[in-house]
């Protein structure tokens, strides 16, 4: 098949890193709306990773920088929404944000940083200016994104929390 999962991940990665319309633009813009949230930038290999990784696994390497973002392909389904094609169906990409807290005790506010990341994610991918983004590769994203916040737990710098964004894409490929 013609790089189906790769194309979806590359689209998400490009949007996140875009300095003019992506997460790296929006996060510094929304962060001041939240108390004690410092702006940061995503940098490939520093706090942005590709693969089915977890923050605790990256912590073991000694290279963890928080907050960190991990992109992975979760699921695809060739249900032939358009026929005949080699692949025609939905793809799911996970965008896992691991936020870390350096406090020795559980922090009094673990929600503000998550709220700021959430705002920047929705601005990056669902802002009306970017609706129906077409990549020219057969991949379309129509703003279908869910998020789930996990509990704060010990790990990382002292405390970590997973926020998973699940993005639904549509992909149509005629093959090679």
Image: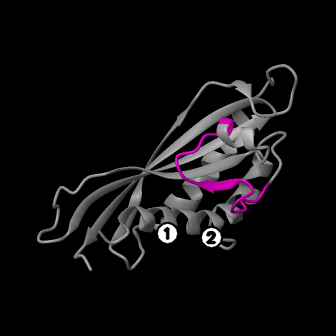
Give the numbered dot on residue 149: none
106 left or right of 78 in image: right
How packed mark 2 is, by other alpha carbons closer than 10 Å (few <14, some 14-19, many 20 or more), is some
Name the residue that disc number 2 marks: 21
Res 120 quadrant in image: bottom right
Q: Position of residue 103 (x, y in %)?
A: 87, 27
Quote the CA–CA distance across marks 1 and 2.
9 Å
Helix, strand or loop at mark 1 = helix
Q: Quadrant of the N terminus?
A: bottom left
**Is 35 within the magenta?**
no
Q: Residue placed at 69% from the left, 48% from the top?
A: 68
Residue 48 on the magenta segment: yes
* Coordinates of residue 121 in the picture (x, y in percent): 58, 53
Q: Quadrant of the C terminus?
A: bottom left
Tell me how the rendering is colored.
one colour
Q: Quadrant of residue 28?
A: bottom right
What residue sits 36% from the left and 69% below the top? Answer: 139
Q: Which residue is mark 1?
A: 130
Name which residue lies at 25% across and 59% down. Answer: 89
| Residue 37 appears left or right of 20 | right
Foreground of the two, 155 or 83: 155
Q: Earlier in the sequence, mark 1 or mark 2?
A: 2
Q: Which residues are magenta?
A: 40-56
| Residue 27 at x, y percent in the picture | 71, 56
Q: Residue at x 29, y 56 (%)?
A: 90
């Amino acid at each position: 098949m013609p790089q189906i999962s790769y194309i979806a991940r590359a689209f998400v990665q490009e949007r996140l890193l875009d300095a003019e319309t992506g997460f790296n633009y929006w996060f510094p813009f929304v962060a001041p709306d939240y108390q004690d949230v410092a702006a940061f930038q995503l940098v490939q290999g520093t706090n942005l990773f590709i693969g089915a990784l977890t923050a605790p696994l990256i912590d073991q390497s000694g290279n963890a920088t928080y907050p960190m973002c991990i992109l992975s392909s979760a699921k695809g389904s060739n249900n032939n929404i358009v026929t005949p094609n080699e692949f025609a169906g939905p793809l799911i990409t996970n965008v896992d944000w691991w936020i870390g807290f350096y406090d020795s005790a559980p922090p009094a506010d673990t929600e503000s940083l998550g709220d700021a990341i959430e705002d920047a994610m929705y601005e990056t991918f669902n802002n009306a200016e970017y609706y129906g983004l077409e990549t020219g590769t057969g991949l379309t994203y129509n703003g279908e994104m869910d998020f789930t916040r996990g509990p704060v737990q010990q790990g990382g710098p002292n405390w970590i929390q997973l926020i998973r964004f699940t993005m639904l894409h549509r992909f149509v490929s005629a093959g090679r």
